[in-house]
Amino acid sequence: MTSLAQWQQQGQTFTFKGHDIFYLTLGDKQKPPLVLIHGFPTCSWDWAKITPALSEHFYLITLDMLGFGFSDKPKQDYSIFEQADIFEALLNKLDIKHYHLLAHDYGDTVAQELLARHHQSGNIGSVIFSNGGLFPETHHPVLLQKLLLSPIGFILSKLVRYEKFKKNFDVICAKKLPEDELKAYWQMLEHKGGVLIMHKLIAYMTERKENRERWVGVMQQTQVPMLLIDGLLDPISGAHMVKRYEELIPNAQVVKLEDTGHYPQVESPAAFSSAALAFLLAH
């Protein structure tokens, strides 16, 4: 696995509205582009375990969204729409016209917004979603997330420590992550004061409810091939979310990882990358 330090060394930055955004490209530019969108509260390093397998077939493009990872973390309001704008800005900078999407958690919602925009641009070849709040009614946030969204969220952001962070990961991941990986994730969360803006980033949970018709509606109407890869043991968006997906999405394609929790690409990288490649190479 690529270390966090190596991941940073391979990356670059570009400027979006005065903010530095960390991004990374891997693989041959002549191969089909695949955009990887990370989740909350981690960063693009989430994908490090599966990028070697994916980069054999695709030109990989990923970034740390505003407020995450190595990117800037201004004390401002955050929006899924702006995160989608950032991805579009990077794709424009790289002169990428057509691409595939692979997303997780918070990134699922960004992918839904990009898919909604696709109907004007026609630039998305396929989409893979993984554990995330695709449907507000099946999203079961952990207590920490609920508290961060509450009126006392700004206070809680100042009190969150590594021990609480680790405890939450131990709950949402069916396969416990090694201590060094968790500490690296925490390091990225602390970088540039990220812990102090968690209550601002968590506003995506409200956005999902406000924009449900747009973001769920496009999944029901689109002709773009879609796949869901889901760790069923995830208490946030596991088996119960898969059931809803199969109810609402026509001809739903789902790969169910029965021994896996909320971070399938980290917990079960071989199974995840195998399922993703089988789908992507067919499209």
Image (cartoon, helix red, strand yellow):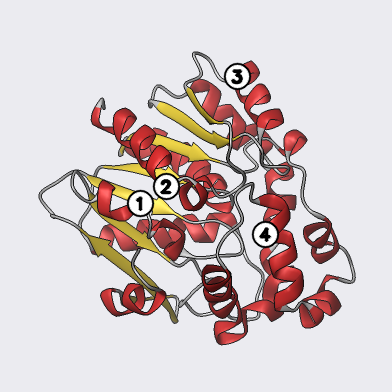
Instruction: Tell me the SS state at disc 1.
Output: loop
User: How far is the residue under mark 1 from the one under mark 4?
Assistant: 20 Å
Q: CA distance from mark 2 to mark 3?
A: 24 Å
CA separation, marks 1 and 2? 6 Å
Q: Which mark is residue 169?
A: 4
Which secondary structure lies at badge 3? helix
Dot 1: few (<14), some (14–19), or many (≥20) neighbours within 10 Å? many
> Which residue lies at the image location 43% right of the left edge and 28% below the top edge?
226
Residues tagged 1 and 2 counted as in contact (Cβ below 8 A): yes
**What is the number of the mark on residue 99?**
none
Q: Which x, y percent locates residue 50?
A: 35, 51
Disc 3 versus disc 1: nearer the observer = 1
- Crowding at dot 4, Cα within 10 Å, few <14 / some 14-19 / many 20+, comes out as some
- At label 2, the amino acid type is Pro
**Is 162 displayed left or right of 108 in the figure?**
right
- Badge 3 crowding class, 10 Å Cα cut-off, few under 14, some 14 to 19, many 20 or more, is some
User: Circle 2 — which element?
Assistant: helix
Would you say the residues marked 3 and 1 are in contact, meaning their CB atoms lie under 8 Å apart?
no
Residue type beneath disc 3: Glu
Q: Earlier in the sequence, mark 2 or mark 3?
A: 3
* Residue identified by numbered label 1: 50
**Gap between marks 3 and 1, in whole Å?**
26 Å
Q: Which residue is mark 3?
A: 246
Task: Name above or below for residue 257 compared with residue 78.
Answer: above
- The answer to which of marks 3 and 1 sits earlier in the sequence is 1
* Residue designated by label 2: 269
What's under tag 1, amino acid-wise? Ile
